[in-house]
Image (tube, rainbow, N blue to C red):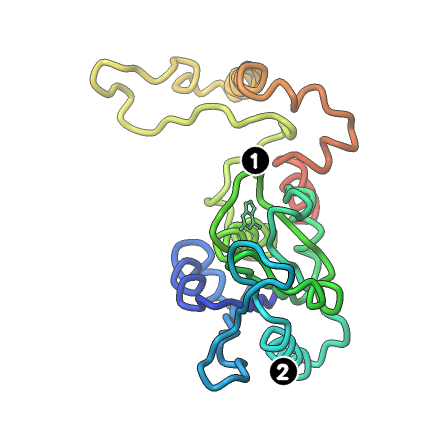
Amino acid sequence: MNYYILTLFPEMVMSGLNTSIIGRGIKNGHISIEAINIRDYATNKHGTVDDYPYGGGAGMVMQAEPIYLAYEALRQRIGSKKPRVIYLTPQGKTFSQGMAAEYAKEEELIFLCGHYEGVDQRILDMIVTDEVSIGDYVLTGGELPAMVMIDTISRLVSGVLNNDDSAVFESFHSNLLEYPQYTRPAEFMGRKVPDVLLSGDHAKVEQWRYEESLRITKERRPDLLELSAGERENAWIGTADKQRQQEM
Ligand code: 6GU
């Protein structure tokens, strides 16, 4: 999987994604991430990439030309005719685990990060294939959403996670929230690990974990239990991991 991020803040996305599991995925060659500075494609002498909105109103709008030039240079370099271009915007479709599983099948993804009050509509019409939001709140730019999406998609790319990374992986209980986890010591400041986890009885442990998952899901996310099969497929966290488990 090769990610390309069109942004005004390349160092922000690169430093955020170079650590931990995603950083290891890059080192191992399972994924690659390249940030492209839209400002490098500014055509006026001041290097500005935004201007006042036609019709008036607050804020600035990112101009079409620098984004188009950055996109076109990238497209020619990677030799892809019509690559998938994701524009991060609160106006987009809300990102979900189901969408992440779909994106994980692609060979390359281009992210376009907007700033200011948005980007010129014509660039959306010309190059953007998908508009995506990460939830119902407003951020100052698309960089954090792009990082959220890349993290989510990358853990579904074959080889990025090893078996130690994911407890969800071992779970049969898709569509439920995770059960509580404990590690040594068996007692911490008077608080004991539940006896069943020390019992060595695998069936009992599985039963306890399932009941805890169900209890926590009912308490915190009853909506997950009420979804139709199709909605669950798209919403939930266990689905894609289960798919991966079957593939391996
Ligand atoms: Cl994708 N962009 C911005 N600016 N704010 C957001 C968002 C995206 N998703 C949720 N809030």
Residue 240: x percent and y percent? 66, 42
Dot label at residue 239: none
Quarter containing the N terminus: bottom right
What residue is disc 2 on?
Answer: 73
Q: Is the residue under label 2 in contact with that under label 1 (CB below 8 Å)?
A: no
Q: Who comes first in sequence, dot 1 or dot 2?
A: 2
Tell which of 58 and 145 is nearer to you.
58
- Name the residue rendered at 60%, 52% in the picture: 89
Q: How many marks?
A: 2
Residue 12: x percent and y percent? 41, 62
Q: Is residue 33 placed above or below 167 in the rendered structure? A: below
Query: Ligand 1 near label 2 (Cβ, under 8 Å)?
Result: no
Residue 161: x percent and y percent? 52, 51
Name the side, left or right, on which 211 lies relative to 124. Answer: left
What residue is disc 1 on?
Answer: 170
Tell which of 92 and 209 is nearer to you.
92
- Name the residue rendered at 75%, 69% in the picture: 126
- Give the label, 1 or 2, closer to the camera: 2
Residue furthest bottom as drawn = 45
- Name the residue rendered at 53%, 19% in the picture: 220
Residue furthest front as drawn = 56
